[in-house]
Image (cartoon, grey):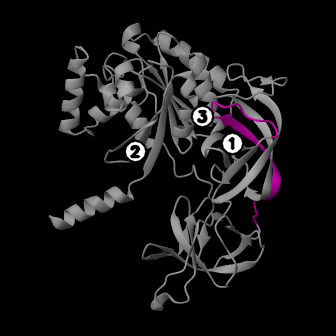
């Protein structure tokens, strides 16, 4: 029995992890959908369900309000909306999942960026009665900007339009017309009713005209192993390991997470910014040694030669070096209520490196509904997206965000109060 338990826990740890985010307009049913996923996949405990039942009765609901499973803040439960990003974890026999339930209100668009930044897939909910809205455009654009590889469009509340195929097909066609303008690789469509459970975990008998899989089937079977960049080897150094023990007296290792490509023992590598070359001596994770490391593994790499390496440096292959520079163009989503200051100075984080930067120019703002460029407005406020030019105090080692989501992302920080004011994707 013990062996079986150990095998089960090992199998769980080895299962593939899918991170997905939900997005949609207010009251499109995001929290209800996640509650339905958790409930129908039997991923909630009895005491959680009991608490939700009591809260539903207190609010005067006739049935169990599954949205309360994710609305954790008191203000959320009082207003029946999502304000902050709520993370939920569950697993099926095929996969582990992390869900980021993001807000639908326009003023919380920055929270959607936060929840979507690490996602493999985005679920975009559309109310079947209302069709595609401004927020649908905004969320789809942000999903494409963040290079989320897979988008699942859930046409929700099909029960309120009598499960009509024509309504679903019109929304599908409208969405495809908009998505054709964006760099979206994989878009799938599912007609659902989160409230009734149609096509969420179980196949719906009310929509026999729909021949595709349920939402759960899609989430379990999306191919995500190729989402990482396995070509361009990038290892940003996070920490230098020097054990203070006699048996490891001469050991020096460099800890971090592989951001791209593969590193093998014996590989010839280059260290940036020095440009010195050496060979990978060993790859260690905790107490286990590996012959190779690849994204998103966190490992310690030791090298054959003693080279001066510190946090913020990057180990790469000498025949495949990232861009190196101080003048960088980014697509930025502004996340602060304080407007962006042209020629303003901000702290900057890129991979494991810290620097400071000056905002040199605003090239244009983006109208997320038409995807048009606004050229004559240089004022960037909360939730606005713009292409800007930066000048950094030291060279960064970067790729375009389209090429590598890890080495192509930048965070801007207000030095006065240490708050994150902008997130950028290197063009």
The residue that disc 1 covers is 424
- From the image, state whether disc 3 or disc 1 is nearer to you: 1
Return the residue found at the far left.
1
The residue that disc 2 covers is 97
- Give the spatial CA distance, label 1 vs label 2: 26 Å
Mark linked to residue 143: 3
Residue 189 lies, in percent from the top left, at 50, 26
Q: At 39% across and 25% down in the image, what residue appears?
A: 75
Is residue 261 in sight in this rendering? yes
Q: Is residue 102 above or below residue 120?
A: above
| Comes first in the chain, label 1 or label 2 | 2
User: At numbered mark 2, what does the secondary structure look like: helix, strand or loop?
Assistant: strand
Q: In the rendered structure, which segment of residues is drawn in magenta?
A: 320-343
Is residue 203 in sight in this rendering? no
User: Which quadrant: the C terminus?
Assistant: top right
Residue 163 lies, in percent from the top left, at 39, 12
Q: Is residue 78 above or below residue 360?
A: above
User: Which quadrant: the N terminus?
Assistant: bottom left
User: At numbered mark 1, what does the secondary structure look like: helix, strand or loop?
Assistant: strand
Mark 3 Cα-neighbour bin, 10 Å: few <14, some 14–19, many ≥20: many
Return the residue found at the far front.
416
Of residues 310 and 50, the one nearer the viewer is 310
Say if the magenta span includes residue 332.
Answer: yes
- Position of 324 with respect to 409 (left or right) is right
> Which of the 4 image quadrants contains residue 219?
top left
| Comes first in the chain, label 3 or label 1 | 3
> Which of the 4 image quadrants contains residue 378?
top right
- Give the spatial CA distance, label 3 vs label 1: 13 Å
Mark 2 Cα-neighbour bin, 10 Å: few <14, some 14–19, many ≥20: some
């Amino acid at each position: 029995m013990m062996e079986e338990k150990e095998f089960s826990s090992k199998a769980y740890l080895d299962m593939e992890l899918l991170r997905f985010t939900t997005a949609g307009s207010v009251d499109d049913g995001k929290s209800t959908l996640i509650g339905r996923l958790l409930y129908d996949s039997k991923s909630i405990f009895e005491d959680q369900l009991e608490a939700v039942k009591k809260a539903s009765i207190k609010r005067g609901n006739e049935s169990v309000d599954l949205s309360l499973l994710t609305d954790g803040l008191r203000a959320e439960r009082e207003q029946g909306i999502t304000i902050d990003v709520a993370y939920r974890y569950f697993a099926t026999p095929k996969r582990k999942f992390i869900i980021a339930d993001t807000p639908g209100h326009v003023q919380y668009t920055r929270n959607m960026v936060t929840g979507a930044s690490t996602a493999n897939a985005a679920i975009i909910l559309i109310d079947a009665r209302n069709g595609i809205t401004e927020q649908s455009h905004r969320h789809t654009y942000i999903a494409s900007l963040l290079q989320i590889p897979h988008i699942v469009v859930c046409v929700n509340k099909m029960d309120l339009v009598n499960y009509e195929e024509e309504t679903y097909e019109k929304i599908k066609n409208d969405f495809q017309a908009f998505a054709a303008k964006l760099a979206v690789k994989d878009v799938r469509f599912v007609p659902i009713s989160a409230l009734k459970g149609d096509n969420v975990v179980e196949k719906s008998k009310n929509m026999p005209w729909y021949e595709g899989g349920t939402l759960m089937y899609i989430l379990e079977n999306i191919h995500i192993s190729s989402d990482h960049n396995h070509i361009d080897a990038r290892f940003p150094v996070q920490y230098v390991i020097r054990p203070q023990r006699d048996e490891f007296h001469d050991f020096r290792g460099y800890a971090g997470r592989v951001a791209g490509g593969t590193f093998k023992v014996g590989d010839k590598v280059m260290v940036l910014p020095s440009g010195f070359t050496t060979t990978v001596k060993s790859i260690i994770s905790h107490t286990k040694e590996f012959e190779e490391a690849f994204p998103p593994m966190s490992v310690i790499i030791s090298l054959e030669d003693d080279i001066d390496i510190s946090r913020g440096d990057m180990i790469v292959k000498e025949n495949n070096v990232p861009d190196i520079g101080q003048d960088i163009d980014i697509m930025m989503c502004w996340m602060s209520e304080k407007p962006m200051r042209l020629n303003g100075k901000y702290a900057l984080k890129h991979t494991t490196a810290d620097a400071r930067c000056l905002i040199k120019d605003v090239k244009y703002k983006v109208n997320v509904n038409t995807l048009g460029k606004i050229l004559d407005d240089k004022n960037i406020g909360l939730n606005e997206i713009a292409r800007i030019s930066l000048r950094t105090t030291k060279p960064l080692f970067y790729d375009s965000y389209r090429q590598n989501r890890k080495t192509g992302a930048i965070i801007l920080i207000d030095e006065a109060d240490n708050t994150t004011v902008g997130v950028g994707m290197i063009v």
